[in-house]
Amino acid sequence: MKAVLSVVGQDKVGIIAGVSNKLAELNINILDLSQTIMEGYFTMMMVCDISQMNLEFVQAKEALNQVGDKLGMQINIQRQDIFDAMHKL
C-alpha cells in the first residue's frame, strides 16, 4: 500500500532529517520524492510504501503531525488511493 506525503513551510535546517527519521521509525519507506524551495518556502512531496508501517495509519498521521509542529511545518499524509480519487478530473 502506498501513501502520498506533503511537507510545506518556511525553509530551515533539519526538515528532511526530521521527516525522514520519523518515517524510518515508523518503518515507512520513501519510494519517490520531489522537493524545492520557492521564495523561502520549502515544499516536498513523497510517495511512500506504508505496507510495513508499525502503527495504524491514524497513529502514524498523528506522529507525523507532531514532527510538523516541532519543525514549524505542515505535514499531510494520505493513502494513495484516496489521493488519486480526490485529484481525478
Image (tube, rainbow, N blue to C red):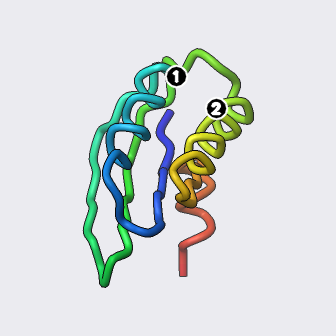
Foreground residue among 71 and 33? 71
Quadrant of the frame with the C terminus: bottom right
Question: Label 1 to label 2, Cα distance in Å?
Answer: 7 Å
Q: Residue at x 55, y 72 (%)?
A: 87
Q: Tell whether label 2 touches label 1 (CB within 8 Å).
A: yes
Quadrant hosting residue 74: bottom right
In-front residue for pair 67/56: 67
Q: Residue at x 40, y 29 (%)?
A: 21
Circle 1 — which element? loop
Q: Position of residue 13 (x, y in %)?
A: 31, 52
SS category of the residue bearing label 2: helix
Disc 1 residue type?
Leu
Closest to the observer, 80 or 13: 13
Q: In the rendered image, which residue does mark 2 sit on?
A: 60
Q: Which mark is residue 17?
A: none
As drawn, 14 above or below 54: below
Question: Is the residue marked by circle 1 packed among few (<14), some (14-19), or many (20+) residues within 10 Å?
Answer: some
**From what the image shows, is residue 19 above or below residue 75?**
above
Q: Amino acid at mark 2?
A: Ala
Q: Which residue is mark 1?
A: 26
Decide if residue 42 is on the left or right side of residue 86: left
Residue closest to the far right = 58
**Residue visible at 37% across and 50% down in the picture:** 46
Where residue 77 sits in the image (x, y, percent)? 57, 49
N-terminal of the pair, mark 1 or mark 2, is: 1
Q: Viewer-proximal residue, 84 or 28? A: 28
**Residue 17: % across, % down:** 33, 38
Position of residue 42 relative to residue 68, above or below, is below
* Depicted 55 relative to depicted 37: above or below: above
The residue sitting at 47% across, 30% down in the picture is: 22
Extreme front residue here?
Answer: 13
